[in-house]
């Protein structure tokens, strides 16, 4: 009987170990090329096109460190993505393989999603720590019209709904000092 328990425990641990993926930081992604990972970070920037949603991590396009490309439709199924994840107000674990993009630039027209635009322009509650003052921080949405060229960049493709985990809301923004007119606030 003890041998049977030992075999069951060993098999359970071995299957758990092979099913787990690595969770890594954006700066460490080049070391994971070709491997399956779980990425959970706040998107810094995004683009919405006819067939794909592009989420940029680490910096804004074109200086991003990593891009997640979400295919809008998989055959007859539409992949659903919370608009808070798109605009960077929430995160979700994204599961996929890291690869280097070798496709052509996306020259399709912007996909005008009014709900995402409204969410992006909605005020974000924030606090200025230095003076303990609550503020509402908002930005203007300006879609990018130039082609999206990711040739040679690190990407992850999301083509199935199961690759997107549960949404996690982020805490309110906390600023050390109030933004000034000299700050680069061009979003």
Image (cartoon, helix red, strand yellow):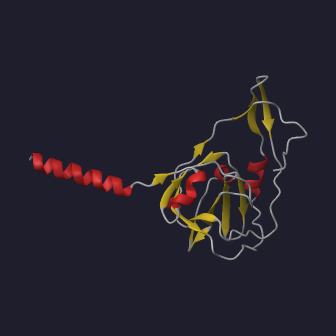
Residue sitting at 79 percent across and 31 percent down? 135
x, y percentage for residue 59? 71, 53
Q: Nearer the viewer, residue 179 or 51?
A: 179
Q: Is residue 17 left or right of residue 172?
A: left
The residue furthest front is: 31
Residue sitting at 57 percent across and 48 percent down? 167
Q: Is residue 76 left or right of residue 48?
A: left
Residue sitting at 72 percent across and 73 percent down? 106
Q: Is residue 123 above or below residue 14?
A: above
Q: Is residue 3 above or below residue 135?
A: below
Q: Which image quadrant for residue 134? A: top right
x, y percentage for residue 103? 65, 76
Q: Is residue 43 left or right of residue 113?
A: left
Q: How many marks?
A: 0
The residue furthest right is: 181
The residue furthest bottom is: 104
x, y percentage for residue 158? 56, 64
Q: Is residue 185 above or below residue 148?
A: above
Q: Which image quadrant for residue 104? A: bottom right
Q: Nearer the viewer, residue 84 or 171?
A: 171
The residue furthest left is: 1
x, y percentage for residue 43? 66, 51
Q: Is residue 27 left or right of residue 183?
A: left
């Amino acid at each position: 009987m003890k041998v049977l328990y030992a075999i069951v425990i060993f098999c359970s641990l071995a299957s758990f170990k092979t099913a787990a993926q690595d969770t890594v930081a954006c700066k460490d992604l080049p070391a994971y090329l070709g491997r399956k990972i779980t990425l959970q970070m706040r998107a810094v920037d995004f683009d919405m096109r006819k067939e794909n949603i592009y989420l940029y991590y680490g910096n804004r396009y074109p200086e991003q460190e990593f891009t997640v490309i979400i295919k809008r439709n998989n055959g007859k199924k539409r992949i659903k993505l919370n608009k808070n994840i798109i605009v960077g107000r929430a995160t979700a674990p994204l599961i996929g393989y890291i690869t280097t993009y070798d496709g052509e630039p996306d020259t399709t027209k912007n996909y005008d999603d009014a709900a995402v635009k409204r969410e992006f322009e909605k005020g974000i509650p924030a606090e200025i720590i230095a003076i303990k003052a609550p503020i509402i921080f908002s930005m203007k949405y300006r879609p990018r019209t130039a082609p999206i060229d990711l040739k040679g960049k690190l990407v992850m493709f999301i083509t199935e709904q199961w690759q997107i985990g549960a949404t996690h809301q982020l805490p309110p923004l906390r600023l050390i000092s109030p933004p000034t007119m000299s700050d680069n606030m061009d979003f």
